[in-house]
Each structure stands twice: as structure tokens, then as C-alpha cells.
Amino acid sequence: MFSYSIKRLLYGILVLLGVVVLVFFLFNVLPGDPARMMLGQQADEESIAIINRDLGRDRPLSTQFIAYLNDLAPVSFHNNNDSTHYFYLDREKYRSAVRLFSIGSTSVVLKKPYLRRSYQSRRPVSEIIASAFPQTAILALTAMAFALLVGITLGVLSAVYRDSWIDRLSLFLSTLGMSLPSFFAAILIAWFFAYLLADWTHLNMFGNLYAVDDYGTGRHLVLKNLILPAFTLGIRPLATLSQLTKNSLLDALSQDYVRTARAKGLSYRRVVLHHALRNALNPVVTSASGWLASLLAGAVFVEYVFDWKGMGVVIVDGLEKYDFPVVMGVILFICVLLVFINILTDILYALLDPRVRLGG
């Protein structure tokens, strides 16, 4: 089990290293000059050169890449004679670092990964992610809870009342949910429920989980702003989970233990809910864990349409303003999250089924 976990961990590290290489070179060859975006209409060549020098963009690309890896690595090298600047004149990068040992004028330090600072706000990217990620997590967890509750219910009803109008309606809704692009679905749902039916639903087309009151005295919770984005984000997993529940439950109902339970006089409802469904939920839970990771990473369009202040809005704003450190940091954070969830899922599979680690 230990060797299997190490293999999964090494595989995850290799994946992250590939993502780092791809993200760095992609965003450093894109057209556009962040210095011009920062300076605006007053940009002149001398000012642009100064900004690029402060950002470290005047150095060769290979040097920039090595420095970027050094920033991301938890164990990195720091020049003792260069305490004033290291990309962006950032004095706080090594403030919480622990010096392990020194080699001449170079110290090897232990620190948390450094994601640079925003070109626009000068805030550390880690702070921007820390403020935006809870909003995305709340949205994704709510959408997943909605998808599980409704999807499993529809799946059970479709299996119990197979070939009925309930089954056909569930299949139609599942097909529609899987075929609708998230961006189009978000616009359509916002227009229908928050514009056409606004007098009945009292829902907002845009809004965050917290809002400032009319007097500016503080923030208050606005749960109704969570309804439409969570509903929109949960449509696709709901469609998958409902059909997966139906097929898995139909397979479970055909097993011998179900017939034995019925022969002993147990009611059909008890057999379905307390015996067949329990075994049928294993693939559903597996699929739900994968969907949760996808929702955390793929809520960009839904958040942008509903102006939900999460990771999606941060990515779009960063792309519009050429704020590359923010976009790169958010992408890397999402990739780390996905790799961690996949590794954890693989280890749990191996604990539950020894054949998995023997095959891996």
C-alpha cells in the first residue's frame, strides 16, 4: 500500500511539473505587454522598460523560468546579497522562510510556494486566491449537494417505474442537461428566473453570497443569490448521476439477494431502499467525487455570468488586464487541487479494493 501511494504521489508531482512548464511558457509568449496595461495612456518606452525590469521580464526566458520554479518550490535558493529585490521588488517573499543551510552567499530555505504578486493590485496572488476560493467552494458544494439529492431521487424513480412517463421525463431532462453548454445555460436561466419571473421568484440576476447594506454599515448574508448559480452548475452532474443511479439500481435489483429478500416477505420499498440502493450507490459516489473536482475547476463561466466573486471572475479579470501572475497562480492552484483529489481517490480505491493497487 505504501509503495502504491508513493507511485501515485510521484505521478501527481510529474503532472504538476508538466502543468507548470506549460502555463509558464504559454503566458510568457502571449501577445500583450503587462507594463503598457499598468501604465495606461501615459506609457512611454522608458517607463515601460523600468516596469519590465521590476517585473523581471527583461531577463532571458530561461532565467525567468528557473526563477519561477525557485519561487514555487518549497525548498529554494536565496541569494544573501540580494535582499532588496527578486522579481517585483518583493521584500516579503522570504519573510516566513526557514533557513536550512548556506553555501557561500546562497542560502537554501524552506518556505511556502510563492505565486508572485498581481501586476494591477500589487496584492500577493495567494491572498487573492484565499479570498476567492471559499466562494467557489461554497458554490461547488451546494451544486453537488443539489445534484446528488435530485439526481439520486430521479434515478431511483426511473428504475422503480421503468418505461413510465417518469422514466422518459428523467431521460429527457438528463439529455437536455448534458447537451446545454454551461455559458448558454447560465444566461438562459438568469434571464428566465431572474428577469421574466422576477416578480414571483424575487431572485437577482447578479450578486454574491454577501452584500453591503444600503447604509454601508456592514455585510449581510444573501442566500438567494446562491440559488441560480448552484442550480446552473449542478445541472450537468445531476443529469449524469440520475442515469448512473438508474442503471446501477436496475443491475442491483436483478441480483439473487434481492429475489431472496422478496421471497422472505420484505416489501418492495424496503428491498429497494435498504438493500439494492445501498449497493447501487458505490459507482454514484465515485462519479460524484470526480464531478466535485470538476465543479471546483470548471465554474468559470457560471461565476462570470452571475458575477459570483469566485475563482472564475478572478481568472477572467486577470486575462482582461494581462495580470498573468494571478491567472497562472489560479490555474496552478486548481491543478494542485485536482491532482490531490485524484490521488486521494486512488488511495481510497486501493484501500477498499486490493486489486487496484496490485494492478497499479
Image (spheres, rainbow, N blue to C red):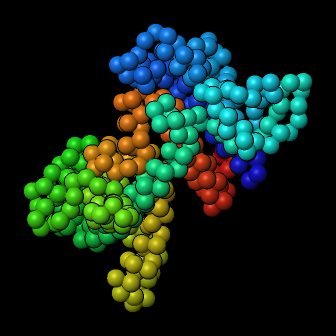
Closer to the camera in the image, 275 or 100: 100
Estimate the x, y position of residue 360 in percent, counting from the top left: 66, 44
Q: In this view of the protein, can residue 32 be seen by the observer?
A: no
Query: On screen, 238 above or below 130?
Result: below
Closer to the camera in the image, 253 or 7: 7
Query: On screen, 104 above or below 332?
Result: above
Query: On screen, 171 above or below 85?
Result: below
Q: Is residue 176 left or right of residue 220?
A: left
Estimate the x, y position of residue 25 in percent, counting from the top left: 54, 20
Query: On screen, 279 above or below 47?
Result: below
Estimate the x, y position of residue 336 in percent, counting from the top left: 58, 43
Quadrant in the picture for residue 235 = bottom left
Residue at position x 30%, y 48% in the image: 307
Residue at position x 86%, y 24% in the image: 105
Quadrant in the picture for residue 165 = bottom left
Residue at position x 60%, y 56% in the image: 349
Estimate the x, y position of residue 12 in percent, counting from the top left: 63, 40
Q: Is residue 121 left or right of residue 77?
A: left
Q: Is residue 249 left or right of residue 51?
A: left
Closer to the camera in the image, 211 or 281: 211
Instruction: Tally the numbered discs.
Output: 0
Residue at position x 26%, y 58% in the image: 228
